[in-house]
Image: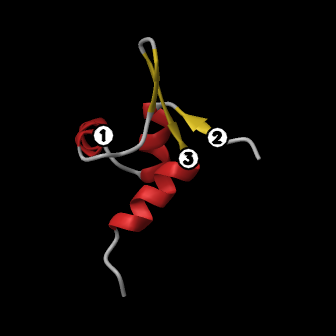
Amino acid sequence: MESELLTKEELCKWLKVSRPTIDRWRKEGLPFIKTGRLVRFDRAKVQKWLEERSPKS
């Protein structure tokens, strides 16, 4: 299964959050991949990270 890599802009659109929110989440442990100056986000890993941070019912 191939992972879908998103740009910051695509991630913002998918999650409906601002760029500063993504930057803050990166400092808090949001998984990302950096190659040179390019930063990408693995959709599946981001989804898992968000699920782990959500309050348990």
Disc 1: CA contacts within 10 A as few (<14), some (14-19) or many (>=20): few
Disc 3: CA contacts within 10 A as few (<14), some (14-19) or many (>=20): some
Residue identifier under label 3:
43
Disc 2: CA contacts within 10 A as few (<14), some (14-19) or many (>=20): few
Residue identifier under label 1:
26
**What is the secondary structure assignment of the residue under circle 3?**
helix
At horizontal 64% and vertical 40% (from top left) the residue drawn is 4
**What is the secondary structure assignment of the residue under circle 1?**
helix
Give the quadrant of residue 5. Answer: top right
Q: Amino acid at mark 3?
A: Arg
Give the quadrant of residue 54. Answer: bottom left
At horizontal 43% and vertical 66% (from top left) the residue drawn is 51
Q: Is residue 2 left or right of residue 35?
A: right
Q: CA distance from mark 3 to mark 2?
A: 6 Å
Contact, CB < 8 Å: mark 3 with mark 2?
yes
Q: CA distance from mark 3 to mark 1?
A: 14 Å
**What is the secondary structure assignment of the residue under circle 2?**
loop
| Count of marks overlaid on the render | 3
Q: Which label's residue is closer to the chain start, 3 or 1?
A: 1
Q: Amino acid at mark 1?
A: Arg
Contact, CB < 8 Å: mark 1 with mark 2?
no
Q: Which label's residue is closer to the chain start, 1 or 2?
A: 2
Say which mark, if any, is on residue 13. none
Q: Which label's residue is closer to the chain start, 3 or 2?
A: 2
Residue 33 against residue 29 in the figure, above or below = above
Say which mark, if any, is on residue 4. 2
Q: Is residue 48 left or right of residue 56?
A: right
What x and y, as percent, mark residue 28? 24, 47
